[in-house]
Image (cartoon, helix red, strand yellow):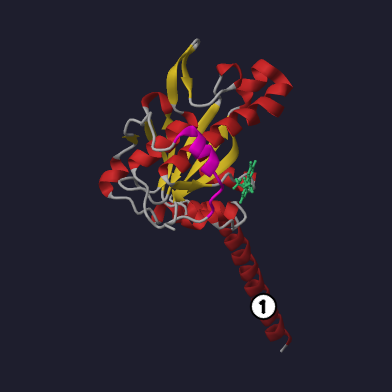
Amino acid sequence: MKGFKIKFRIIYFIIFILILLSIIAWNSVFKDSNLIKKLLIQLSSASTIEDRMKKEIILPKPDYKGRLSVEEAIYGRQSIRKYSKDPLSLREISQMLWSANGINIDGTTGPTRSYPSAGGLYPLDIYLAVFNVKNLGKGLYKYIPEKNKLRITLRGDLKSALYEASYYQNMFGSAAEVIIYAYDYSILKRIYDKRGIERYAHMDIGHSAENVYLQAESLGIGTVAVGAFNDIEIEKILNIKDKEILYLLPIGKKNKM
Ligand SMILES: Cc1cc2nc3c(=O)[nH]c(=O)nc-3n(C[C@H](O)[C@H](O)[C@H](O)COP(=O)(O)O)c2cc1C
């Protein structure tokens, strides 16, 4: 009888250890929710095979003349947080990206950008998270201003991950894309030290983001500057190294009145 009880205790003990081990294994696989997010992002990609093959997309040349005057765009500018379901076109995203960080007329130090930058350093990279753009697969793209093109860095739908990492702010739900500001502080630090990273970086970005607002107004597009998000989560989702993600600008067509 005694031997029988001991056997039972040993079996209970083994079952207990097995349950414990499975809990530990389960946690180690699933605790990194980014692993799952990345997996889901890859699986939920809606792009075509042909689109998947394309690593770089040449954008249409931006227009240098618009339908609104600067004054009208300034007057109409406002933050818009709900967008229509209509997709954006490549022409529209080219125009928006150009306004954020495009090449404009030659300055005294060479080609300048659409926004002023301390010391003409332009340490800003613009990325684009695409959800609903005609002829462009879902994913994350880097804007290459010198060539006016996009280079894919991640494939798949980042919408829900960005929504979550931005504290569930509603504008991500209806946005067709998000313009992402990635800033290289080290360049400004080297030249301007503390002043560069505490002041100039944020001034640079503010100038560029206002351009995006004005360009959006001119195209009948809505946007809103988003500064509230979880830095660590965003960094993991976008996998952009050695740069700070400072601003997100969700974008979509305005709803018709
Ligand atoms: C630095 C900065 C951060 C912002 N962050 C957010 C944000 O996280 N979420 C949001 O809904 N609006 C955000 N906004 C937009 C402001 O709320 C908006 O500009 C303000 O309410 C004025 O409205 P208007 O832009 O329509 O004039 C931000 C604006 C700035 C300049």
Membership of 71 in magenta stretch: yes
Q: Where is the N terminus found, in terms of image quarters?
A: bottom right
Give the residue type that dot 1 points to.
Answer: Tyr
Residue at image location 41% in from the left, 42% down from the top: 219
| 134 displayed left or right of 96 | left
Q: Position of residue 85 (x, y in %)?
A: 40, 58
Look at mark 1 in the image and give the residue it sits on: 12
Q: Where is the C terminus found, in terms of image quarters?
A: bottom left
Residue at image location 45% in from the left, 50% down from the top: 252
Q: Is residue 93 in sight in this rendering?
A: yes
Residue at image location 29% in from the left, 41% down from the top: 53
Q: Secondary structure at mark 1?
A: helix
Depth check: give the residue in front, 233 or 12. Answer: 233
As drawn, 228 above or below 212: below
Membership of 14 in magenta stretch: no
The quarter of the picture where residue 59 lies is: top left
As drawn, 173 above or below 193: below
Q: In the rendered structure, which segment of residues is drawn in magenta?
A: 69-81
Q: Is residue 242 in sight in this rendering?
A: no
Q: Position of residue 27 (x, y in %)?
A: 61, 60
Q: Position of residue 23 (x, y in %)?
A: 62, 65
Residue density around tag 1, few if under 14, some if 14–19, many if 20 or more, within 10 Å = few
Depth check: give the residue in front, 26 or 123. Answer: 123
| 252 displayed left or right of 204 | left
As drawn, 81 above or below 249: below
Residue that lies at the very extreme toward the left in this rendered image: 50
Q: Position of residue 168 (x, y in %)?
A: 59, 58
